Image (spheres, helix red, strand yellow):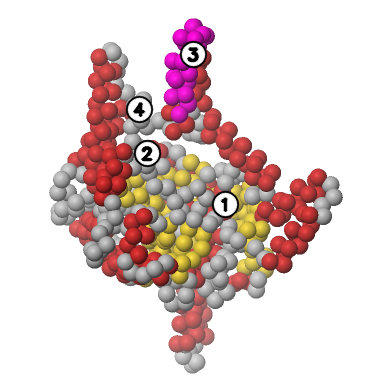
Amino acid sequence: MTQTSSAPVVRYLGGESGHRSFFGGTHSRARIILIGIFITAGLVLTPLMGAPGLIIGVLGCAVTFVLTAKTHRGSILERRTKRERWKARVKTGTDAFVPYEVGAWDQLSEAAKNAGTKDEAWKAQRELTAMRAMPDGADGMGWLQYDANMPGIAWHAPTGEEPYLSVAFSVTGQLRGIESESKMSRAAEAWGRFLASRAVPSSLVGDVQTLTRVLPADSVLQELWVQSSLDPAAPAEAVNSYAEVLRLTGDGAMVQRHYIIVKWPLTPTFYNTAERYARGRDGWRAVMEQEIRSTVRGLKDARLGDVAALSARQTAAIMKHQQNPTWPIDYVRDIEPGNFGSPSHDEFSAYVVDDLDPTAGGVPTQWWHRTAKISAEALATAPRTQLWPLDLLIGSELQFVRSISFHIHLIPAGEAKASARQDLVRDLADKQSKLEAGQLDVDDNGAGITAASRRTQDLASGSHHNGAAWVGFVTVSARTRDGLARASRQLEETCSTGLGIERLDWQDSYQSAAAGTTWPIARGTTAGGSSFSARVYDRLAGKSEKEALS
């Protein structure tokens, strides 16, 4: 970043969710694969069968376009996939979760072996499948470091994904109340420098997640201060007056807690770096100790206020609170880092947690959650400042508990610049071919050209910018099914009218797993496929020399 003016930093977001395909535009992966199959089939079958072979290829492509056409409720193929996924989950028992216990597991295993009828065997197997060590949102998660008063280093090995380490950091935020435009600009530039410094090829960081938890105000700390500081001779009227002030200020008020989560993929580069510190897991911890200190310094330089790396118990307490909002977010006394999941079951459009309320003597409580995805293609292309999601964070009409998370996948500047130029060339070529064919240029193509041009300009040499791919997730929570339905509608209205988000992609049929995208564990993104040239250069770079210090 080199901008130093007092005007707010403005960037264009939205409109693009991927690079241009072979067929032009940003088609879905399913569409590209199916069209490729039918075109190949047509080319092969036409010489063999004549007209019927050509008809098969043409009809196949036409059906593919119909099945993959995007609507405000998703494509037909996506809806079909969700229904099939939900049927499979109900059949296997993965739509429910029960924390793992050795004794209960042995009993269920014995019941499954001794089941008499086919129906009894199916029910016993469902109960056995429901008992798991981690909830779906944290599947494959463990801890590399979970000691008290030390940064908690989570170790993830999700099914079908690249393993990685993550650490959560609490921050107090960049802005306090009413701030000048110059301070807002400096804060945005500082955050940009932090991301750019982690996107260089030599960095071990892969993704950065921002998380804001919006929850009702808690006056416990003020009440404790009053109890310890109250003058025994204070008039009863004064005491009652202060209690009334606490009640009025907390009634309907929502507060925000902010976190930054950093992800370190376990790549050959990470292993090679760790070997220079120590053998095995000790080398991992040594590398992470240095990385955590560097991240804390970087977040402080990014003007994010007070920064602290969370311990494993603190991170687990946040996730326990997100499942059961009656659990205080800072309450770590009864938390075990390896066992923070609450009993739950899924409905098609909801993740339902059945737990106990520790603030009310352990009475049963139930919370309903639903998660939606915010993609770049669903965001209207427009100039935006860093305050564009403010209505989602502090909107006065949104009186429900929620978590807002954005995942940023960092891309080295060289690779991002090459992709932007390639996209721009393809868009311009597509526009020229349409003009030569006598067709009018559509808005989608014009928006693509504009977006690719801006990316090319932003990534110009000397700009010190990096590439990034982002995705957002929002989880809303309510105590009842009807309350969750109302919260979902309010969220959609706020996003469409105040944020320019044309469509929320509700993660129905697997809501329990989707909830993990708003937990402080960097779930929700997979590393985008590198270009062929980038993979070649990575191979050419090889490993660092044994004699080198770093």
Q: Is residue 49 magenta?
A: yes
Question: Could you tell whether 174 is left or right of 247 in the image?
Answer: left
Residue 22: which numbered mark, if any? Answer: 4
Q: Residue at x 52, y 26 (%)?
A: 67
- Whichever of labels 2 and 3 marks the residue nearer the N terminus, that label is 2
Where in the figure is residue 423, as x and y percent of width and height?
28, 33
Badge 4: residue crowd in 10 Å (few <14, some 14–19, many ≥20)? few
- Tell me the mark number nearer the camera, choosing from 2 and 3: 3
Q: Give amino acid for label 2.
A: Ser
Q: CA distance from mark 2 to mark 3?
A: 35 Å
Is residue 502 shown to the viewer in this render? Answer: yes
Where in the figure is residue 196, as x and y percent of width and height?
25, 54
- Whichever of labels 4 and 2 marks the residue nearer the N terminus, that label is 2
Residue 17: which numbered mark, if any? Answer: 2
Per the image, label 4 sits on a secondary structure element best described as loop
Per the image, label 2 sits on a secondary structure element best described as loop
Question: Could you tell whether 2 is left or right of 342 in the image?
Answer: left
537 or 236: nearer the eye? Answer: 537
548 or 388: nearer the eye? Answer: 548
Q: Residue furthest bottom?
A: 233
Q: Residue at x 42, y 47 (%)?
A: 526
Q: Residue at x 32, y 50 (%)?
A: 410
- Whichever of labels 4 and 1 marks the residue nearer the N terminus, that label is 4
Residue on which disc 3 sits: 45
